[in-house]
Image (spheres, grey):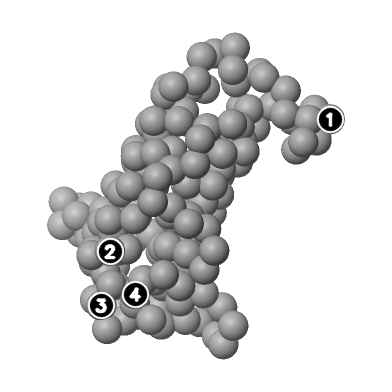
Amino acid sequence: MKAQAALDLQQLQEKFTKLAGAIPQEKSSWRPAEGVRSINELFVHVAGAGFYFPTLKGTPAAPGFTPKDFEKSTTDKAKVIEWLNKSFTYAIASVQSMSNAEFAAPLPKLGPQANAGDVVYLMVVHAHEHLGQAIAYSRSVGVVPPWTAEAAKKNPKAPQD
């Protein structure tokens, strides 16, 4: 699970940072409805989660990360991408530092059957869920995900996800 989780997080980091980079700054405040996260807030939420989930299994808090009002802490595209990179780097290092035995370590505060591996699983699933949301948001403002655009160049007849 360790190697796969780290690989998933590395791939998610690449996709999130590429997608954040592809969305023009002037479109990053778009939100699908009042009271719903904007594109920027979504990306910063994902970064915040990458800092938060590892602390559930006992990893020390990341230096420089303050959870209070973090989602609204920046609208600057470069800073959003920087936070995504820092967050994924922190999360990946947290997973890679675990021994196989630590994945099975009980975490009763999360539930009677919960363990540290569950936290890693939830962190990866959470990021995948929000990647789908980020793709929908990007398409709503006319941005094709970069990896889809690259695939279309290689094979223009392939379906466009």
Q: Nearer the viewer, residue 67 or 98?
A: 67
Q: Residue at 45% of width from left, 30% of height from top? A: 94
For label 1, the crowd category at 10 Å Cα-Cα, with few meaning under 14, some 14 to 19 and many 20 or more, is: few
Q: Residue at x 65, y 32 (%)?
A: 118
Q: Position of residue 52 (x, y in %)?
A: 54, 47
Mark 4 or mark 3, which is nearer the start of the sequence? 3
First along the sequence among labels 4 and 1: 4
Q: Give the Cα separation between the discs numbered 3 and 4.
A: 8 Å
Asked if residue 67 is positioned above or below residue 6 in the image, the reply reads below
Cβ–Cβ below 8 Å for labels 4 and 1? no
- Residue wearing tag 2: 79
Residue at numbered disc 4: 75
> Looking at the picture, how far across and down is residue 86, in whole percent?
33, 47
- The reply to whether dot 1 and dot 3 touch (C-beta < 8 Å) is no
For residue 112, the mark is 1
- The residue wearing badge 3 is 25
Mark closer to the observer (1, 2): 2
Give the CA separation, mark 1 to mark 3: 45 Å
Q: Identify the residue at horizontal 47%, vertical 46% (top origin).
A: 51
Q: Earlier in the sequence, mark 1 or mark 3?
A: 3
Q: Is residue 39 left or right of residue 121?
A: left
What's under tag 3, amino acid-wise? Answer: Gln
The first of marks 1 and 2 along the sequence is 2
* 82 shown above or below 11: below
How packed mark 2 is, by other alpha carbons closer than 10 Å (few <14, some 14-19, many 20 or more), is few
